[in-house]
Image: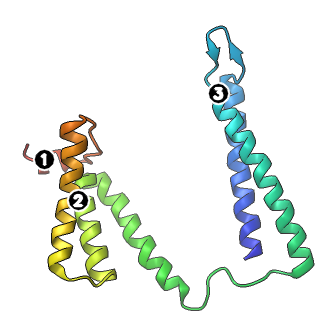
Amino acid sequence: MRKADIIVALGLMLVGFIVLADTIRLGFGWGMSGPEAGFFPFYMGLGIVICTFFIVLRGLKTYKKEGAGKRLVAEGGLTQILWVLIPAAGMVLLTELIGLHFATVLYLGFYMGVVGKMHWFKVILISLLIPSATYIVFDKLFLIPLPEGLWGKYLIPF
């Protein structure tokens, strides 16, 4: 577990350094008309680097003192992680193909029906009502189009 803490903190620190490098390229100072393009991202990246530095420092200190600690994933825990990860990755892929609304219908239907083992009437009702309400609120009322994917615009007739 402590190794994972250190590795994740180092990965986030790398992200912070990448942000810092890019904001320096953009300009992170205060210009004639206010903050330059990289002003706020620079300080966010700096905050990430500083915080992750202390996390790595604490993780290394604890690792040297107490050892590696417990396993990151307990016995049999990988199956539970995959039951969350695979449908979520499938939803992302489906969103690219059929759009967010239809991918949400399939995701909710699968997750509630198969993983949650809910009654199929509730599954069908909820997995149709939530994406429909989202479509009406965002696409029709607020005029904010959500991702349609490659084929999504052909699937919604109105």
Mark 1 or 2: in front is 2
Mark 1 or 3: in front is 3
Q: Quick check: 116 above or below 55?
A: below
Task: Indicate which disc, 1 or 3, sits on the residue closer to the N terminus.
Answer: 3
Q: Amino acid at mark 2?
A: Ile
Where, by quadrant of the figure, is residue 6 drawn? bottom right
1 and 2 marks in contact (CB < 8 Å): no
Q: Quick check: 103 above or below 69?
A: above
Task: Indicate which disc, 3 or 2, sits on the residue closer to the N terminus.
Answer: 3
Quick one: label 3, few (<14), some, or many (20+) residues within 10 Å? many
Q: What residue do we see at 69% from left, 33% from top?
A: 42
Q: CA distance from mark 3 to mark 2?
A: 38 Å
| Place of residue 75 in the rendered image (x, y in percent of width and height, measured from the top left) | 59, 91
Q: Amino acid at mark 1?
A: Tyr
Query: Which residue is tagged 1?
Result: 154
Query: Which residue is tagged 2?
Result: 130
> Considering the image in quadrants, where does the C terminus appear?
top left
Task: Indicate which disc, 1 or 2, sits on the residue closer to the N terminus.
Answer: 2
Q: Amino acid at mark 3?
A: Gly
Q: Quick check: 5 above or below 102?
A: below
Quick one: label 2, few (<14), some, or many (20+) residues within 10 Å? some
Mark 3 or 2: in front is 2
- Secondary structure at badge 2 equals helix
Query: Which residue is tagged 3?
Result: 38
